[in-house]
Image: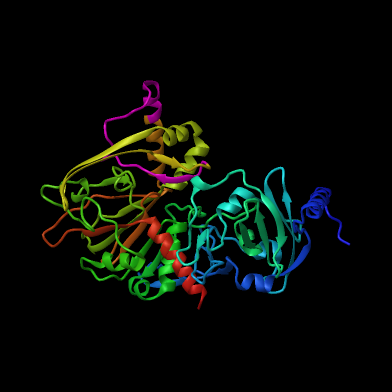
Amino acid sequence: MMSLPTWLRAVLQCLANLAQDKKVNMAGRLGVISLASFAATSLRICRPIPAVRTARNAFGSTKPLNGASSQGGSSIELMKCFSVQSEHAVFAPPISLEDHAGTRNRAKMTSDVGMDVENKQLIVSLKGGLRQAFPFVWLRDNCQCPVCFHPTAMSRKTYAYELNVDITAKSVEMSPDSNGVIIHWEDGHKSHFTFHWLRAYCFIDSKQDQYLDPKFDFWGADIDLQSFNFDEVLKNDGALYNWLTELVSRGIAVVTNAPSKVGQLHSLGGRVAFLRPSNYGPTFQVKSKVDPNHVAYTSGALSLHTDMAYYIRQPGIQMLHCIDQAEGTGGENLFSDGFKVAMDLKEDDPEAFRLLSTIPFEFSDVGTDYYGSFHQYSRHPTIRLDERGEVVSVTLSDHSRDPMLRAPLHQVQPLYRALNKYCNMLLDPQNVFKYKMEKGDIMTFNNRRALHGRSSFRVTQAGGRHLEGGYLEWDEVNSRLRVLAAQLNSK
């Protein structure tokens, strides 16, 4: 006979007494769950999709790369997920069923359910010592019954203002098939949750979302830049998937062999979703002008920067398509990994890192272009952190940084000293990757991470330098990756 924990025996005794007195059917019995059937309809089915990368060698051809990047990268695993209520593929923070339960098709999992009345929680104990608590208020908010959740719209039908935050269960019992728990609420409502649904959305030991919380591969001047053939990305979902995952992990990649004419970014962007327009149009042409309205439209050098710093929400990914390249020396693109250098700064000078991550600069852009007159204005810290203190974006633009600086007077000089140090670290030769694009190359990079610039070049009568630029948003990229994962996993 299995020995139950003291707390659980006490709870079960209370429930038994209550059931006897009030004829309430409460159960805390053990049940056996088959992981094979568990996984067959699981919210999460783990299927890593290996990335096949290509890189340009010294002679301009491409070659396959086997294994992980030399920069220490790891393959990204995508989870195929299905709704309890429908066969529509949906996604949530990824978790592998094998993590605590062994091989999906052979392992057995035993569950035991009960209530923590004092803390208003459902308690689910799984074989192997894994014990999960689920607050009743959260369970009621996420009830999967047709009254509370629309099965085809995949949307909650209840409202937060109606929720009783102190709600508790009247009883809990194992479902007849032993694959879930049925909760009888004190207001007469009934909810059913399968154990695979509870395991997928557990509070303890849940895994991070690999798109919202990706693991980054840092790089420097010696990066082995990965290349992807333009036609393959347009026609092959596997190539599209590999290109986008490279942008997630390293934040930079080149797409090669595109036609050397305007308009190719619409085709490439269309494979993801749609291009994000700016003041300068759906795309923009980067070439020298007699009367430029932006420093990019000159033949001079451009310092390392992120684009559209004067937008409140800067574009997520930038694409630069080389239609014509300046002859002779000059015109090289320069790149530096802003995340990697930010972490170097944090280790070397924590106070400088603190100043750049807490005091914002302001940015502006005024002019007339594709959509008429504009006046953009925004405010960003140089290094933006999330709620966990992780670097999530970098904003740096000398040519659009505004004179307005809303900082305490005694911190102005230390702030400039920190900015100066960070910029010099970005320009350290070991951090700067130089790449002179060839006709047909499309350089793609994370605009909130990879700072870019260029060396000066000379315009001749024989020709000049012409790039077409455009942007994508991370929301669309992540959405496309999730859809691709489901499609590729189903094959």
Instruction: Give the farthest residue toward the right.
Output: 1
Displayed quadrant of residue 267: bottom left
Q: Is residue 163 magenta?
A: no
Q: Residue at x 37, y 39 (%)?
A: 423
Q: Residue at x 41, y 27 (%)?
A: 414
Q: Is residue 94 left or right of residue 300?
A: right
Q: Which residues are magenta?
A: 389-415
Tell me, yes or no, if residue 132 can be seen here.
no
Q: What's the image's color scheme?
A: rainbow
Q: Is residue 410 magenta?
A: yes
The number of numbered discs placed on residues in the rendered structure image is 0
Q: Is residue 485 left or right of residue 468?
A: right
On the image, the x and y values in percent for residue 68 come to 53, 64
Quadrant showing the N terminus: bottom right
On the image, the x and y values in percent for residue 184 come to 66, 56
Q: Is residue 59 positioned above or below 223 on the image? A: below
- Foreground: 121 or 246? 121
Q: Residue at x 30, y 44 (%)?
A: 311
Q: Is residue 449 positioned above or below 126 on the image? A: above
- Foreground: 260 or 154? 154
Q: Residue at x 82, y 48 (%)?
A: 10
On the image, the x and y values in percent for residue 491 come to 50, 78
